[in-house]
């Protein structure tokens, strides 16, 4: 076997998602994932710390991208425009991965522990975005209201994107969720 | 010692909060709480399943009150009016307990495990409110957007109510948070 495996990370991820769906997340071992991908456990651990990281490994990067978009938004942008820019900045991280996102969602939906993890990761993102807004001199409670609004809009759009069979692009759904929230709130 | 203890529950709660603040939540035992309150452990367990329930025991009641307000709101109310009515319905459960709420908040802020628990309890409330709205024929994603908006408004108002020295009434802060969110979103 050659040392370099083309797209080893992607193959491991796909093998893991298939097994989590077939057998359940708890019942799947790293050994089985590596075997299914035709790779070694050692290769698995080159890309992922454990089997949970297959599902949540992208979150750190997501957080950095969102925070960096807040930091670099133009001075003329309002807080809500800044947060929408942050959501739009993370869209490309998902766009090509809709099928993976759908499988991941069905694994998480089947496991309360993973649902908790997902919620806490979202809370961490909200808190990082709130802090980034504060550093741009957005005061409290506005910073927190804006960051939380961004999270709702994203969560709603994302749920439609993974849940609806012929869902439009994630960026279109983000815009639609935001517009809907605006209409709801103005009554 | 007489069998009936006036306000035993309140005394146990206050003793627990004092000890959680003095020694830390993890370091405090039920034995110490009962002793500080001048009551027995047996009396403690008549009111609370464990030391965590001193902090989270009220949540079940809160959820029922919010859901019942959604169910009984007038047919003419819009979804956002229904959710505001639900928030207003829970206010009396807090109003007389501001000092307790402040102490509770400082205990939770000092303990990441308790912060997670608090977040997950809020998520449970959001999900119960979303379901109650659906039963009133509010469709998705509107039901979820509205319930989440209610949670943000409440969380923001509550944070000010426990955090600001001369905070106005919780109901005034709820109204203020909602108005602020409205302004933010309309840009």
Image (cartoon, coloured by chain):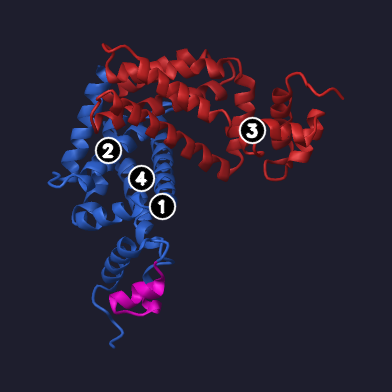
Chain colours: A blue, B red
Would you say residue A46 sits in the magenta stretch? no
Give me the residue at 36% from left, 77% from top: A43
Q: Outermost residue toward the right?
A: B1
Q: In which quarter of the image is residue A123?
A: top left
| Label 4 and label 2 in one chain | yes
Pointer 2: what residue? A156
Residue A143 visible = no
Ranked by sequence position, the earlier of labels 1 and 2 is 1
Question: Which marked residue is nearer to the observer: mark 2 or mark 3?
Answer: 3
Question: Which marked residue is nearer to the observer: mark 4 or mark 3?
Answer: 3
The Cα atoms of the two marked residues, 1 and 3, are separated by 27 Å
Give me the residue at 25% from left, 46% from top: A89
Q: Give the range drawn in magenta.
A: A28-44
Asked whether the residues under the numbered discs 1 and 3 touch, taking CB atoms below 8 Å apart as contact, a structural biologist would say no
What chain does mark 3 sit on? B
Give me the residue at 40% from left, 71% from top: A30
What chain does mark 2 sit on? A
Residue A20 placement (x, y as % from top left) = 34, 62
Numbered badge on residue A114: 1
Q: Nearer the viewer, residue A180 or B147?
A: B147
Ranked by sequence position, the earlier of labels 4 and 1 is 4
The Cα atoms of the two marked residues, 2 and 3, are separated by 34 Å
Q: Quadrant of the N terminus of chain B?
A: top right
- A54 relative to B76 in the view: left or right: right
Residue B102 placement (x, y as % from top left) = 61, 26
Pointer 4: what residue? A67
What chain does mark 4 sit on? A
Q: Nearer the viewer, residue A92 or A36?
A: A36
Q: Outermost residue toward the bottom?
A: A1
């Amino acid at each position: 076997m050659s040392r370099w495996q083309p797209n080893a990370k992607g193959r491991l991820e796909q093998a893991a998602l298939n097994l989590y769906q077939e057998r359940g997340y708890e019942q799947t071992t790293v050994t089985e994932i590596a075997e299914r991908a035709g790779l070694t456990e050692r290769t698995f651990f080159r890309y992922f710390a454990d089997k949970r990281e297959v599902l949540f490994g992208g979150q750190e990067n997501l957080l950095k991208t969102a925070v960096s978009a807040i930091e670099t938004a133009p001075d003329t942008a309002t807080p809500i425009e800044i947060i929408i820019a942050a959501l739009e900045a993370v869209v490309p991280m998902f766009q090509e991965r809709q099928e993976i996102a759908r499988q991941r969602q069905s694994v998480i939906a089947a496991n309360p522990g993973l649902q908790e993890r997902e919620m806490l990761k979202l809370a961490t993102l909200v808190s990082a975005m709130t802090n980034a807004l504060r550093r741009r001199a957005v005061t409290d409670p506005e910073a927190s209201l804006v960051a939380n609004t961004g999270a709702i809009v994203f969560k709603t759009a994302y749920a439609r994107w993974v849940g609806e069979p012929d869902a439009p692009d994630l960026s279109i759904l983000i815009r639609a969720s935001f517009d809907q929230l605006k209409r709801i709130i103005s009554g």
